[in-house]
């Protein structure tokens, strides 16, 4: 099958990028567990290393199984190309790497996953980069945070942990006016619920560990390039618009056009950073994508049911699910995310920190793990785990206060999930 953009999402999530194996006719994409690939001759090898021909050299750079996944995710997101890597955190660095330099900054949402806030506020300083955190609901604050050294704006489509929904189009318009790319982490929404490129994003990143794989088996990340940004419009992005010494002065944007960022990610990013996705991980994620739409429908349906029950429970202070009419993000969610606002949200337990600890210890169906997007329902107390490195003020800004737990609703029977939460809340607040 030759897939086209006219094919529906359900068809593309199964077929995009995949062909029967030419050697064996195998219908499922094989796991090409190979480090290196034989060149046809010396000229072929030279052409590959000069980026004059596309092919396989060494699996730190390219691998046939990973290549299928890259094409599939790019197709589902409506992008020109994609680069898969070892984790979601790796994808974030891979996205920033061609854009940043010493003294440059990224304007980032204050409602990001705690590990991302730590990566941006602490780790990237070692590269000479910095981050300015703003509330992306305050568009004037986003505009005001951008200066002459800003090289990107970064946000999540549906924020982890609180499930807050972002007006991607509004943020994209601000980034466009400043002549810089918008990077959207679409992990929580997935391309089934949100396609940020259609709303103006330049780059999309994923932790493929989560919903795209959906079964809690492997880690992975992906950067999707829209192919729509003019990297040569100004002198802010020399890695893409200026001659590259490692490739005899070749200019990526001039040579590769809409695929400039993607080729740079492979030829320079993976070559030098080595954040490679292994082929078995790609295989598991490919199998996961085949049921993405079916799973997301159930995640959303269950989350709506559980959130509505929790909101009415007197042992709960509040629920952050944007699918509830009481949410300040309800109208935005209905407008920007018509298929649903995901399966991730938080709720506050009366009794504070101690009650939250008792709750997670008493649950039986929910698994207490540092993950989300699994078929299984998951829970974590962010303040004592994923967000514990942050200050109390940062925890509150991220929606991870001491009285809050995050739940990732799976695809089990919603009645069983409610019964499990009911007994655990009794144990936590009695």
Image: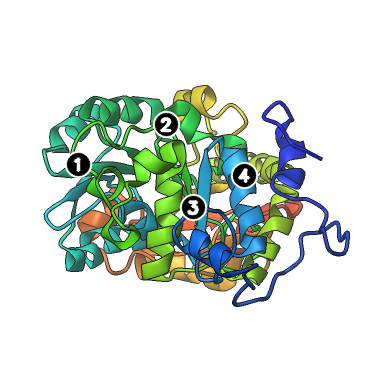
For numbered disc 4, what is the local secondary structure? helix
Task: Report how far apart the C-alphas of labels 2 and 3 lie in the structure.
Answer: 23 Å
Q: Position of residue 354 (x, y in %)?
A: 40, 69
- Check whether the beta carbons of the residues at disc 2 and disc 1 lie within 8 A of each other: no
Marking on residue 357: none
303 or 112: which is nearer to us? 112
Q: How is the image coloured?
A: rainbow
Q: Considering only order in the chain, which callout, 1 or 3, is on the residue closer to the N terminus? A: 3
122 or 74: which is nearer to us? 74
Please name which of the two marks, 3 or 1, marks the residue nearer to the observer. 3
Q: Position of residue 227 (x, y in %)?
A: 45, 36
For numbered disc 2, what is the local secondary structure? loop
Q: Which residue is mark 2?
A: 228
Q: Which residue is mark 4?
A: 303
* Label 1 packing within 10 angstroms: few (<14), some (14-19), many (20+): many
Q: Which residue is mark 3?
A: 52
Q: Residue at x 30, y 32 (%)?
A: 137
Q: Considering only order in the chain, which callout, 4 or 3, is on the residue closer to the N terminus? A: 3
Tell me if I can see residue 41 in this picture.
yes
């Amino acid at each position: 099958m030759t897939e086209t953009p006219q094919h529906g999402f359900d068809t593309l999530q199964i077929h995009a990028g995949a062909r029967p194996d030419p050697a064996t006719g195998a219908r499922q994409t094989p796991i090409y567990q190979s480090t290196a690939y034989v060149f046809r001759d010396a000229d072929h090898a030279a052409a590959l290393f000069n980026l004059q021909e596309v092919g396989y050299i060494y699996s730190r750079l390219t691998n046939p199984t990973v290549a299928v996944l890259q094409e599939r995710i790019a197709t589902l997101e409506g992008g020109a190309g994609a680069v898969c890597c070892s984790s979601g955190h790796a994808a974030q660095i891979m996205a920033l790497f061609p854009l940043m330099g010493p003294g440059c900054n990224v304007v980032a949402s204050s409602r990001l996953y705690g590990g991302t806030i730590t990566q941006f506020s602490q780790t990237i300083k070692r590269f000479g980069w910095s981050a300015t955190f703003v509330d992306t609901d305050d568009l004037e604050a986003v505009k005001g945070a951008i200066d002459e050294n800003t090289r990107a704006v970064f946000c999540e489509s549906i924020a982890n942990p609180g499930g807050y929904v972002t007006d991607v189009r509004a943020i994209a318009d601000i980034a466009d006016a400043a002549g810089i790319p918008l990077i959207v982490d679409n992990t929580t929404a997935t391309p089934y619920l949100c396609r940020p490129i259609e709303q103006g994003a330049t780059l999309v990143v994923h932790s493929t560990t989560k919903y795209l794989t959906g079964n809690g088996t492997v880690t992975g990340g992906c950067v999707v390039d829209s192919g729509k940004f003019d990297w040569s419009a100004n002198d802010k992005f020399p890695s893409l618009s200026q001659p590259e010494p490692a490739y005899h002065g070749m200019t990526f944007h001039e040579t590769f056009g809409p695929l400039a960022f993607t080729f740079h990610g492979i030829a320079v990013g993976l070559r030098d950073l080595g954040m490679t996705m292994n082929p078995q991980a790609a295989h598991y994620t490919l199998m996961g994508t085949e049921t993405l739409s079916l799973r997301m429908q159930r995640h959303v349906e269950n989350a709506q049911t559980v959130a509505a029950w929790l909101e009415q429970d007197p042992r709960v202070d509040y629920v952050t699910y944007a699918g509830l009419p009481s949410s300040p993000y309800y109208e935005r969610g209905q407008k920007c995310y018509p298929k649903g606002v995901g399966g991730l949200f938080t709720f506050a337990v009366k009794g504070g920190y101690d009650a939250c600890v008792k709750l997670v210890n008493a649950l039986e169906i929910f698994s207490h793990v540092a993950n989300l997007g699994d078929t299984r329902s998951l829970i974590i107390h962010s303040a004592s785990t994923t967000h514990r490195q942050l200050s109390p003020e940062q925890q509150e800004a991220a929606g991870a206060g001491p009285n809050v737990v995050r739940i990732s609703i799976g695809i089990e029977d919603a009645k069983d999930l409610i019964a499990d939460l009911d007994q655990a809340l009794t144990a936590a607040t009695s």
